[in-house]
Image (cartoon, rainbow, N blue to C red):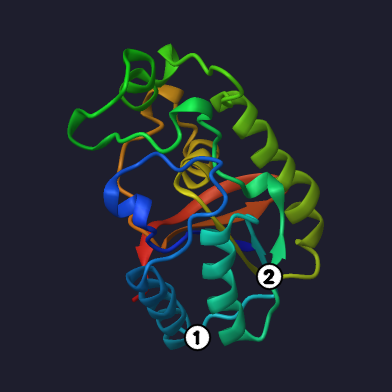
Amino acid sequence: MEIYFLRHGETEWNRERRIQGSTAWTDLTDEGVRLAEAALGGMLARGLAFDRIFSSPYRRAMHTAQIIGAGFGVEPVADERLCEISFGPYEGTRYGEGLFVDDNIRACFQDPPRYVPRDGAESFESVAARVRDFIDRELAPLSATCSRVLAVAHGGILRTVLGFAMNRPLADFWKGTQPNCCAHVVTLTDGMLSLKARAVVFG
């Protein structure tokens, strides 16, 4: 079974280079909507079809999933295991051009093993556990009946999937670019993920 893990379209906080994390209310900008529509067009042009569409329930992801789902006639199913990493008190703060509020959140993005989650923030290990649970308990049972599935999520979730598929250490978590509405394409066979294509842009 093929799984397309797609990052949501652009939000205002993406544009302002603010940490979004578990902030659920941020929605797509006009450009974010255009990117989602372009992704749909590119997928249709490639002859893709999806048996199921899953999405993080956060507005920016679900809006993206609804745009794409409407084009395929598939209603997205919300799954909280696809939510972005929670950064606790750091959410809403800027990270662009070195504008980190302290050394701990700087370590999160520059030296992940040194990061210490605080005040309700989530660890990388916790995120990996819930994404693994989604793959094992939600996707794996579909392998017998589905050939292709779409999961609309967030940058941190896509990087977690790459970690599984490429056996990457945590130190490499943030390496590589993932533009809005790009997708990592993986195959799932006997519970094992293999990377087929990385950061595909369809539009």
Check residue 47 in the rendering and tell me which mark sits there, or answer none.
1
Q: Toward the viewer: 19 or 197?
A: 19
Say which element carries label 1: loop
Query: Is residue 5 shown to the viewer in this render?
Result: no
Check residue 135 in the rendering and tell me which mark sits there, or answer none.
none
Mark 1 Cα within 10 Å, few/some/many (few <14, many 20+)? Answer: few
| Residue drawn at the location 52% of the way across and 69% of the way down | 64
Mark 2 Cα within 10 Å, few/some/many (few <14, many 20+)? Answer: many
In this rendering, position of residue 53 left or right of residue 32 = right
Say which element carries label 2: loop
Q: Toward the viewer: 86 or 44?
A: 86
Query: Is residue 108 shown to the viewer in this render?
Result: yes
The kind of residue on which mark 1 rests is: Gly
Q: Toward the viewer: 90 or 6?
A: 90
Residue picked out by circle 2: 76
| Residue drawn at the location 49% of the way across and 26% of the way down | 89
